[in-house]
């Protein structure tokens, strides 16, 4: 592509919520006629969308800003780290502008200040679904911004503000456009998905000419009418989450819940300012699995929290054994600037935190191995992610992209990413499955 003088480079860091922010900024810029470029050398300006959640993410963001300045020289910074503008400008005084998270208009205005919009209605065409940074067959769909929790280890409310739910109709219009464009899987994300509609007091909205309530259950039910997988992420275990299980059992949405639990000991959970009824969580998990045997549960935990004793860590391992979660991530506690947990007594040495993380993951690896081994011999529908000469790489309903396992299928079949096929599971490891196709022609999603 010849250099038009309107080329924008982009670096997107952090979580899927940040990725959605990047997509929105890029969609707006592309709609105005800017060209999106994949190299520092050809870009006339570079935008870096940063993450500022934990120290390692801050360092990665600062390194990315420095690299963009060195390689290009004209850099706009946005995202969570942008809330700490003084830190960015102290390290890199030559950045052109700094904005906070989901500040789409401010970013676009900063671009306008450097490179006036080149909009041409004959060449600046944008598909209805906008610019996507994921593969064509799946997309993240953000249903709200911000969070009303005050977890002691987290500064997300300071970075992204309080909960702001998107209108029901706006969410469904975006979902419908994505599916019409070829998206086969919608990954529903937010800081707190199960709180959707709380700030709206669940007020009615309209979708397809009928009144709907701004509640997660109703939103999930509407998405389930589309011809795509619907996968729920960041669902806190509020009581009304029970209402999602029948939708999963009926095949309306995927039987998958990403539910960040963080710990299994009562005192540690209270120190984290998290819901502390672990016994209720275990009983609800058991009840959910009775109603929906295919349910996959993913969660994340923090080990080595300030003051965590060896006995409390053992409580967490016992919780893990009883819960028998399918997919689990674990973080060794890392201090975050501005987090209340920094003031708690009993900070643990890094080697203790990392040792507990390794022990935790060893226990979970065996749980995962056993649960996957039980799937050998079963038939299931999988979604193709990659087609290589010697194998297909796919995912089942139990596998979210990038964070969960994969299904490996040998052979060079005439298929494309985004196709659904039926397979029989032939082998399992601690994280992945192997399978043979039993229906090579594409299978329609329910």
Image (cartoon, grey):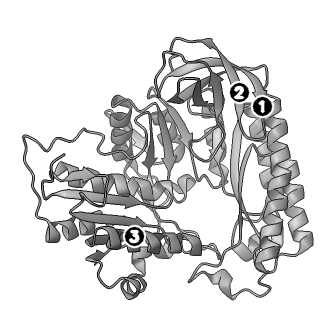
Q: Which mark is residue 219?
A: none
* Label 1 – label 2 distance at C-alpha: 6 Å
Instruction: Mark 1 and mark 2 in contact? Answer it, CB < 8 Å.
Output: yes
Tag 3's secondary structure? helix
State the image coordinates of residue 364 (x, y, percent, origin top left).
81, 50
Residue 311, given in percent of the width and then of the height, sits at: 92, 70
Between the residue at mark 1 and the residue at mark 3, the CA separation in whole angstroms equals: 41 Å
| CB atoms of marks 2 and 3 within 8 Å | no
User: What is the distance, in whole Å, between disc 2 and disc 3 at their CAs?
Assistant: 40 Å
| Tag 2 secondary structure | strand
**Relative horizontal placement of residue 275, taking residue 253 as reference (left or right):** right
Q: Is residue 164 above or below residue 385?
A: below
Q: Residue at x 78, y 40 (%)?
A: 430
- Residue count near mark 2 (Cα–Cα under 10 Å), binned few <14, some 14–19, many ≥20: some
Left or right: 437 as drawn, with respect to 360: left
Task: Name the residue that disc number 2 marks.
Answer: 434
* Structural crowding at the residue carrying mark 1, measured as other residues with C-alpha within 10 Å and reported as few (<14), some (14–19) or many (≥20): many
| N-term mark: 2 or 3 | 3
Name the residue carrying label 1: 428
Q: Nearer the viewer, mark 1 or mark 3?
A: 3
Task: Give the image quarter of residue 411.
Answer: top right
Q: Position of residue 211 (x, y in %)?
A: 37, 39
The residue wearing badge 3 is: 67
* Residue under the point 71% across and 72% down: 333
């Amino acid at each position: 592509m010849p250099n038009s003088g309107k080329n924008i480079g982009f670096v997107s860091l952090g979580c899927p919520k940040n990725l959605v922010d990047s997509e929105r900024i890029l969609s707006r810029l592309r709609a105005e006629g800017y060209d999106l470029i994949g190299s520092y050398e050809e870009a006339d300006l570079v935008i870096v969308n940063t993450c500022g959640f934990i120290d390692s993410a801050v360092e990665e963001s600062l390194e990315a800003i420095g690299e963009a300045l060195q390689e290009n020289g004209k850099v706009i910074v946005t995202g969570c780290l942008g809330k700490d503008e003084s830190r960015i400008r102290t390290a890199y005084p030559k950045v052109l502008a700094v904005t906070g998270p989901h500040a789409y208009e401010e970013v676009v205005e900063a671009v306008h200040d450097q490179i006036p919009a080149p909009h041409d209605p004959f060449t600046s065409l944008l598909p209805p679904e906008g610019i996507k940074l994921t593969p064509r067959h799946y997309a993240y769909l953000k249903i709200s911004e911000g969070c009303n929790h005050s977890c002691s280890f987290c500064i997300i409310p300071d970075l992204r503000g309080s909960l702001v739910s998107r209108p029901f109709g706006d969410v469904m219009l975006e979902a419908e456009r994505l599916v019409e464009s070829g998206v086969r899987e919608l990954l529903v994300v937010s800081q707190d998905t199960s709180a959707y509609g709380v700030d709206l007091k669940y007020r009615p909205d309209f979708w397809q000419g009928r009144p709907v309530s701004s509640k997660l259950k109703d939103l999930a039910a509407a998405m389930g009418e589309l011809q795509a997988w619907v996968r729920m992420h960041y669902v806190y275990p509020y009581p009304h989450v029970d209402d999602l299980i029948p939708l999963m059992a009926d095949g309306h949405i995927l039987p998958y819940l990403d539910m960040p639990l963080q710990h299994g000991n009562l005192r540690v959970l209270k120190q984290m300012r998290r819901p502390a009824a672990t016994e209720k969580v275990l009983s609800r998990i058991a009840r959910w699995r009775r109603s929906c045997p295919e349910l996959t549960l993913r969660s994340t935990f923090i080990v080595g929290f300030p003051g965590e004793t060896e006995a409390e860590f053992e409580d967490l391992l016992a919780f893990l054994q009883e819960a028998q979660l399918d997919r689990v991530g674990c973080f060794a506690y890392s201090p975050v600037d501005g987090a209340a947990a920094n003031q708690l007594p009993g900070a643990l040495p890094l080697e203790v935190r990392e040792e507990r993380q390794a022990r935790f993951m060893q226990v979970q690896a065996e749980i995962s191995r056993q649960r996957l081994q039980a799937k050998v011999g079963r038939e299931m529908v999988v979604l193709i992610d990659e087609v290589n000469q010697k194998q297909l790489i796919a995912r089942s309903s139990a596998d979210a992209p990038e964070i969960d396992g994969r299904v490996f299928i040998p052979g060079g079949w005439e298929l494309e990413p985004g196709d659904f096929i039926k397979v029989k599971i032939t082998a399992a490891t601690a994280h992945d499955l192997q399978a043979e196709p039993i229906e090579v022609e594409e299978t329609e999603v329910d």
